[in-house]
Image (cartoon, helix red, strand yellow):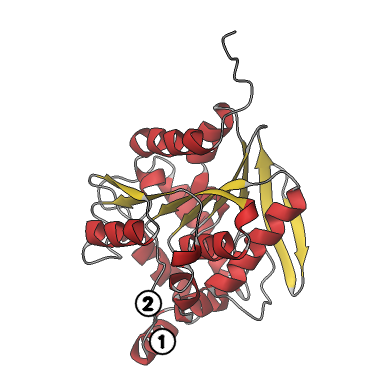
Amino acid sequence: MNTSFLDQQGGRIAYDDAGSGPLVVCVPSMGDVRGEYRFLAPQLAAAGYRVVTMDLRGLGESSVAWPDFSVAGVGSDLVALIRSLQAGPAVIVGCSMAAGAAVWAAAEAPELAAGLLLIGPFVRGRTSQLGKLLYSALFARPWGAAVWLRYYSTLYPTRKPADFAAYAAALRANLAAPGRLEALQQMLFASKDAAEERLPRVKAPALVLMGSKDPDFKQPEAEAQWVANSLHARYAMAPGAGHYPHAEMPDITGPLALSFVQSVHEPANVSHAA
């Protein structure tokens, strides 16, 4: 698939665009690339949706030199992308930190957000000074990309996709490129306060999707319930899944995601009985 680019002040964002119909925009988690949605995006496109998957600033094919790697910075890219496509409003799918960016975007530009699908959402919290020192050491060069991939593997606790080895190798190579580990560190350092503060302002319908074995949360279901309650939304658990239920168990989570999208967006090419 050919990569498209959105020029932003300070850099450019890479994305791809498939299918036709109402718009769905998918944003990956920190430390990953838009290929994270390689299983979910085709399911949505086949069901009658235009699916745009974007790379985060600093990662994938996006440029690396940005002044801000926070949820607000990524959220502003999301808003700019939806506006540039002139096809909104969109259902926004965000995983991990990108869920916080989706919340920011929905609060700041409610006319562009038809709905939010938040997967393993990080929408609150700050990294302590000790944590920043630890991340600086763990993800420093030359070992940082390898350390991240060892951690990344733990986020799939029950089963890994058939293409995991090749995908992980490509992800490691991407992170090893100049500027990309540094971008990841800045995302890890960034506060999620801008997302938490905006939760009460989100009016779009939302679904929180959480893996029951997500190792990034001490109590995954309690966190999912808290986020859902904050948004007056509902949540669904993927039994046995980790931080990437849409990639670890696409056969289970794909239909859940599609059902939510359909509840917000009527797919293209739907015929109505007379």
Looking at the picture, tell me which residue is in the foreground, 104 or 248. Answer: 104
Mark linked to residue 187:
none
Split into 4 quadrants, where in the image is the C terminus?
A: top right
Residue 181 sits above or below residue 223 on the image: below
Which residue type does callout 1 highlight? Lys
> Where in the figure is residue 73, as x and y percent of width and height?
61, 72
Q: Tell whether 146 sits left or right of 184.
A: left
Which of the two discs, 2 and 1, sits closer to the camera? 2
The residue at the point 38 percent across, 37 percent down is 256
> Where in the figure is residue 199, as x and y percent of width and height?
45, 66
Mark linked to residue 132:
1
Residue 233 sits above or below residue 48 on the image: below
Quadrant in the rendering for residue 225:
bottom left
The residue at the point 56 percent across, 30 percent down is 266
Q: Earlier in the sequence, mark 2 or mark 1?
A: 2
Looking at the picture, tell me which residue is in the foreground, 256 or 131. Answer: 256
Quadrant in the rendering for residue 56:
bottom right
Split into 4 quadrants, where in the image is the N terminus?
A: top right
How far apart are the two marked residues, 2 and 1, measured between alpha carbons? Answer: 13 Å
Which residue ends up furthest to the top in the rendered image?
Answer: 274
Circle 2 is placed at which residue position?
Answer: 125
> Where in the figure is residue 175, as x and y percent of width and height?
54, 67
Q: Residues within 10 Å of mark 2 (few under 14, many from 20)?
A: few
**Disc 1 element:** helix
The residue at the point 41 percent across, 86 percent down is 132
